[in-house]
Image (cartoon, rainbow, N blue to C red):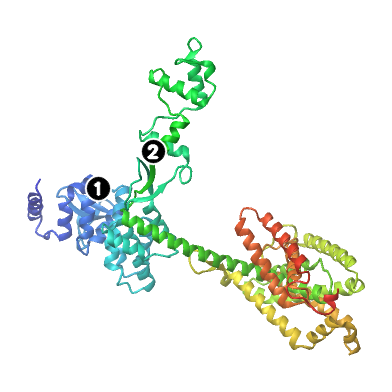
Amino acid sequence: MPRFLQLLTVYALWLAAPATAQAPSAIQALLQEHREIIEKSSRKTIGPAIDALAASGLPEARSVLEKWQAKELWLRKEDGLFVYAEKGTDSYTLIDIASAVEIGSAGKRALKQLKPNSGIRGMIAAALVQFQLNDPDPVQRAAALDAIERDPEASHLAALRSGSGADPDLSLKARKARLERLLTIRFDPDEAARIAAIEGFAGDLGVDVRATLNPLVATTRGVVAGAAPQGPAIARILVPGTDLARDDAYTLLVETGLAPPRISRENQRAALIAHIVGGEVAGIQVADLNTDAARDLAYAELARRDQVDALATEADVDAALAAHSFYETFSAAPPGVAQAALQALAAIDRSVGLNQAADLTLDALSLASIYFLAAIGLAITFGVMGVINMAHGEFIMMGAYTGYVVQLFVPDYTLSIAIALPLAFAVTFGAGVTMERLVIRWLYHRPLETLLATFGISIALQQIAKNIFGTQARPLTSPDWLSGALVLNDVVSISYIRIAIFVMALFFLAVFLFIMRRTRLGLEVRAVTQNPRMAASMGINPDRINMLTFGLGSGIAGVAGVTIGLYAKVTSEMGQDYIVQSFMTVVVGGVGNIWGTLLGATLVGFLQKGIEWLNPSNTLAAQTYMILFIILFIQFRPKGIIALKGRAAEA
């Protein structure tokens, strides 16, 4: 029925309705205009109706689309009126779609419910985006942007352009502008606009940008006889054997009908044997078929006689490859757009490389700060006192378990960490003093016996920890404000816990320097380190200084254990994970020198991360290579980066 007659019929029905009824609203008239395709509810034909509602500008259009999507739009059969319906006790209450007021009731048989399938609901959802983008509620606008990001369509581009510059929320405004540029790249028919949008993303590290640009540079392979074609659509020229495997190149020739299929030497030999007649093959004596060239000649003669299929030999393959040119053409976008995308991706790759280097540097600094925390106590005991303490890792373990025990009684993680840090220092300081008084003091200047004794203590402490806490890892939970990571971009990020460890390392560096340079204890330690006999003659008790020094180194190890426990697993063996790196840090940096320890931790941290980056699939190999490098380093610089003068240097 022509549209004019259709509208006239609707108007006549309204005239025949009760006097209380009003003239059809604009939204009702629009739905009546597309009534036929709405009733059919086919995804292939429904598009014009949805588009007409979305583009109508009518204030009721959004509500109609939402109700339709939710299967709450009904059709009254007697007059074809579109209504909303609410189920009552015996009938349905009808609601006008324009005024939202009740207009009567009807039984279910008098109504037809419009039930769009999932495909149509998806189309309606796409049409609703433009309304949600201009919704006064920022949550709705953000939800619309999320929907576009998940499943962008060409229809979204106009909606984004109409509202991208007016959003009062600056973050949503930026998201709209970015999405508008991304959709311009994908859907805008104007090639110049697409290229301009692509150029605006040069160097952008967003994954969404790469996901948009990568499909644009898709290529298909082609081959042509003679010289390679030229032009902007040509992505690159392929050289068989270099850019393109020789077999793949010939397969392309066969697929395009430019060369016959290949034949293997085995199949060729079988075909020749099958055609031996009177000691000859195609007029050639069998005895003469002792070379590849002769066999090729015989097979070619059989093919000429139509006794076998004409197949290519190796010589034919070489000749065919030499006579043709292979190339790739852009297949997913116009040449100008594809070239712009290729250049933008190259700039992005450079930017990604630089940011990966920055991310690797942050990881290395983070690892160096962990090693520095683990080694600073060892730098005191080993560097100042010359004591090889193999139980140093167990003091780290004791500190971590102290933090765990504190959290059992103090559920506030921030407060528990604040309590655990000084308590861990006190516990491990006391353990270190006890160990020095009972064992170490009797073994000074006897390094082998000291090493064996502390190694035995290390095993004993591990077993005690297993007996108390078990073999399973125990949680040392960080506060909520340390959860998550500082994300600079899609490539560079660092966890807040690692930042906290880095800050803690700097704090302990400052504390150590203050103690050694601004306190009486530090003055006496330096005096004993330089010349213990002269220090004793000046009234300093070297025995007491050794005890306090060992306790200080052990206490710092305990605090390091709490800090490291927030990042690593807390087990009875956790100290063993850091004892080797701690000794390497101290030895490489220079025993007894805090700045040397800092440099040593930095060198070891960067070295380990660099080796892991070169060989990411084998961390054990990275550890091995690092140890080998340290051994070689010590051969050329046995006293470390910064050599200490005094007793430790002589030892």
The disc label shown at residue 108, or none: 1
- Residue drawn at (88%, 68%) of the image: 447
How crowded is the residue under tag 2: few (<14 C-alpha within 10 Å), some, or many (20+)?
few
The residue that label 2 is drawn on is: 323
Q: Amino acid at mark 2?
A: Ala
- Residue drawn at (70%, 82%) of the image: 511
> Which quadrant is home to the C terminus?
bottom right
The disc label shown at residue 63, or none: none
Disc 2 element? helix
- Name of the residue lying farthest toward the bottom: 538
In this view of the protein, can residue 57 be seen by the observer? yes
Q: Where residue 535 appears, x then y in whole percent?
A: 87, 86
Q: Quadrant of residue 469?
A: bottom right
Side of 52 relative to 254 (left or right): left
Indicate whether 13 appears above or below 251: below
- Name of the residue lying farthest toward the top: 278
Q: Where residue 397 appears, x then y in whole percent?
A: 74, 66
Q: CA distance from mark 2 to mark 1?
A: 76 Å
260 and 573: which one is in front? 260
Label whose residue precedes the other's in the sequence (2 or 1): 1
Disc 1 element? helix
Labels 2, 1: front one: 2
